Amino acid sequence: MATLAGSTIASTYTYLLKMDGTSGLTSSLVAVQDGDATDSALKISTTSASVAHTVTTAASTPKALFIDANTSGVAAQNATGMHIDFDRTVAGSGTAAHNDIGIDLDVNSASLGTSSVIGMDIDVVGATGGTHTATGLTVTVGSSDTNYAALFNGGNVGIGVNAAMSAPTSPLTISGDVRLLGYDSTSSSATYFRKGGSGSDTASFHMGVVSNDFAIVEDTSGATGTRVTVETGGNVGIGDDAPPTNLQIKGTGTVNIGLESTDNAQNLDIDYYDNGNNPYGRIRWHEGTANWTFQTNVTSSSTDIMTITGTGEVLKVKQPAFLAQPSSAQADFAADNSAVTVVFGTERFDQGGNFASNTFTAPATGKYQLNASLYMILVDSAPNYYDMTIVTSLRSYYAIFDPDQGQDHTYRSLHVSVLADMDTNDTAHVTIRQHSGTAQTDIDAASYFSGYLAC
């Protein structure tokens, strides 16, 4: 191999170095070194606008340009396989348009068989020992009017896609995690989406980190603003960029939440789950009956506790309510001014199971509507008075009358109706008292004692 020295070769020949023909590249061509014996395997430089270097070959395994650089230095060093340094200087005030390209890669294949055409194949492998950073491609774009790190026109791009996967069918296919990082502690990263077309009113969104929260933001002209926010603590806001609850939905005017089933025969459920992922409470829209139903004990057998019918009726199937009557007449109760408990042996209904042994027990604190009516037979005219009482744990409610009208009464009724306040486990029962006279009065089986939780 000859040594080319001096600078006259640049003005004498079109090419600084040209290898042409099938015998141009052989195993005996190991390195090409410039005159000052630097570490560049091949260094080509030119100040003209003409092509600096052309290499052609027609070998069976063609390599238009093959560079094999090896280094075995132990000391710290930076090794470069190929370095291209291209600079343009414009003298004076020249304003001519130029297209400056560091590497112009043009690959065309006219193969009739099954072929793989690859414009650039980069294979970077770090050593097995020590600490290395292996980078396949680093692109740094300097400051200018318009900066593009990479522009792809046509074809699909695959990142992390290997031969075992399907070839990318979209403009960009990524297999693996995608991480967006702000360039400093105060900046944020975002992914932008824009509908095709032009004009400021074209729908446009971006999503990314905003003030340490994740947000989806609309950028459309006349409709800008944060649409969805996920706070670092887990709260989600729709139309609210500072949601105070786990899910906050905010809007102007009427705010709508829609649930839709594509199968009209199905129910729509809103369930509450415990930490074990078990549903304990449910609000159900029943398509078949057009009812809203509130349910508990969803983990075992669902229990309806309230139903709102399609026509507006509210059914509280667990609301405490009862009606009891005597099984038979309670004859000749005492006439000694003592309070006699009225016996109600027949329960017409007892919703909630809170009535037993003539006594109602409140299952929850609230206001209870209590009603009692005693149908008395053979009322004695001699006593000073008769009184009936609904006795609760907190207070008692009375009805009283004087029977002295010159003769005994064949029948007489006493009634008490009251909205009474009761605490949990408070009780209520009915008593009758006759002050003196003859113990001849009976309480007929038509009497009753009823009540329900009103509020």
Image (cartoon, rainbow, N blue to C red):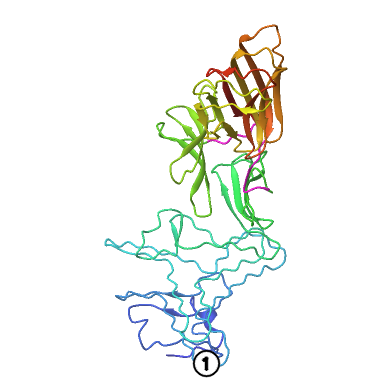
Residue reaching furthest to the top? 406
* Residue 57: x %, y % from top left: 36, 75
Q: Is residue 172 above or below residue 335?
A: below
Residue 395 is left or right of residue 76, and the answer is right
Determine which residue is flagged by label 1. 73
Q: Residue 56 lies in what quarter of the image? A: bottom left
Q: In percent of the image, x 37 and y 81: which residue is there? A: 24
- Residue type indicated by callout 1: Gly
Residue toward you, 349 or 297: 349
Residue toward you, 235 or 32: 235
Q: Residue 337 lies in what quarter of the image? A: top right
Q: In percent of the image, x 63 and y 70: which residue is there? A: 88
Residue reaching furthest to the front? 438
Q: In percent of the image, x 65 and y 22: which residue is there? A: 335
For the C terminus, which image quadrant? Answer: top right
Residue toward you, 438 or 77: 438
Q: Residue 83 lies in what quarter of the image? A: bottom right
- Magenta span: 243-258
Report if residue 199 lies within the magenta region: no
**Residue 253 visible in rendering:** no
Q: In percent of the image, x 27 and y 61: which residue is there? A: 112
* Residue 180: x %, y % from top left: 58, 61
Residue 54 is left or right of residue 61, and the answer is right
Report if residue 257 lies within the magenta region: yes
